[in-house]
Image (spheres, rainbow, N blue to C red):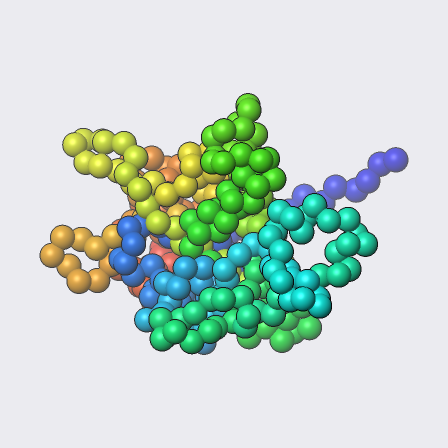
């Protein structure tokens, strides 16, 4: 059986911000990643939904959902006694009927004032966003995960429990690292493809860590295991390193680096540039771009 193959003719418009872009911004803590990405949209703050995984947005004006886990926690339906994720996964289908999801406002997470706050699982938020998009009720054009680091930490806890190990690195043949990478990339790709389907942009933030020394300067990379770092950056269309220059008060973002695997851009207008780290500066750089004549 033969099928017809459609060949697409792609003609990029270099001075227009494409829809469905995946951005990755990484840098040291408290350099402004959360503040800037919370309004990283043509509509400003109104266009962004921030998935806050580590309470980094407590002091930022934003639209946020607090996420504190990958899967929702369970408790016994009658006694209300919680059960660990490991013990719940060991139950058979009949036994699981005696358990219920703990409501988000009863998951023992508190804001800085000491008040309880609804906290959701990543899987719950994904299902909610999917439903909102499918029913045309999702008002945001951009979704931000702040931060990828925290999600990876939760995944490592899950992997250790599943493999019966105390810490990452103990499994044979690197099975723990492979499984961790698989789980994290599944979350990223699922949300990325969902948002792309509806023309929404996706932003990830990540903390940075020192990597190698080049020209007597300490270079930075994502604060993730090496194999996972490569997997995450491969999903991004634009990768920027965020930092505050010496003597400056506002952050900059660098799209050119010592290693193109760590920083770069598929958006031609941003490639190799260092800009003020705010949405309008980045948008202006794109819309004012002019292709050089040969």
Quick one: 23 or 283, which is closer to the camera? Answer: 23
**Who's the residue at 44% across and 63% down the image?**
52
Which residue ends up furthest to the right in the rendered image?
1
x and y, in percent, of residue 275 in the image: 27, 56
Residue 212 to residue 247: above or below: above
Locate the N terminus by quadrant: top right
x and y, in percent, of residue 173 in the image: 55, 23
70 sits left or right of 269 in the view: right
Residue 131 to residue 214: above or below: below
Quick one: 80 or 270, which is closer to the camera? Answer: 80
Q: Is residue 267 visible?
A: no
Locate the C terminus by quadrant: top left
Which residue ends up furthest to the left in the rendered image?
247
**Who's the residue at 37% across and 43% down the image?**
223
Quick one: 110 or 64, which is closer to the camera? Answer: 110
Which residue ends up furthest to the front in the rendered image?
79
Residue 242 to residue 119: above or below: above
Residue 207 to residue 18: above or below: above
**Who's the residue at 41% across and 41% down the image?**
224
Quick one: 35 or 278, which is closer to the camera? Answer: 35
Q: Is residue 117 visible?
A: yes
x and y, in percent, of residue 196 in the image: 58, 57
263 sits left or right of 213 in the view: right
**Who's the residue at 74% across and 41% down the image?**
5
172 sits left or right of 237 in the view: right
């Amino acid at each position: 059986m033969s099928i017809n193959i459609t060949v697409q003719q792609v003609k990029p418009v270099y001075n227009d911000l494409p829809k469905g872009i995946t951005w990755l911004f990484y840098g040291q803590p408290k350099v402004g990643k959360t503040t800037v990405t919370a309004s990283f949209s043509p509509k400003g703050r109104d266009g962004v939904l921030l998935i806050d995984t580590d309470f980094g947005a407590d002091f930022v004006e934003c639209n946020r959902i607090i996420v504190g886990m990958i899967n929702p926690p369970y408790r016994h339906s009658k006694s209300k006694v919680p059960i660990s994720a490991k013990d719940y996964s060991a139950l058979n289908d009949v036994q699981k009927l005696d358990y219920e999801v703990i409501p988000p406002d009863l998951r023992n997470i508190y804001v800085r004032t000491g008040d309880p706050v609804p906290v959701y699982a990543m899987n719950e938020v994904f299902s909610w966003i999917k439903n909102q998009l499918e029913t045309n009720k999702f008002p945001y054009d951009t979704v931000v995960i702040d931060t990828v680091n925290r999600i990876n930490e939760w995944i490592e806890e899950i992997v250790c429990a599943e493999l019966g190990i105390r810490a990452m690195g103990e499994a044979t043949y690197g099975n723990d690292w492979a499984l961790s990478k698989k789980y994290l990339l599944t979350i990223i790709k699922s949300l990325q493809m969902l948002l792309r389907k509806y023309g929404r942009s996706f932003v990830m933030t990540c903390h940075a860590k020192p990597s190698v020394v080049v020209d007597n300067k300490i270079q930075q990379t994502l604060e993730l295991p090496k194999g996972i770092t490569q997997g995450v950056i491969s999903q991004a269309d634009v990768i920027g390193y965020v930092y505050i220059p010496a003597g400056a008060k506002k952050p900059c973002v660098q799209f050119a680096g010592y290693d193109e695997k760590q920083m770069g851009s598929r958006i031609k207008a941003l490639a190799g540039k260092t800009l003020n780290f705010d949405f309008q500066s980045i948008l202006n750089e794109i819309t004012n771009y002019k292709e050089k004549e040969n």
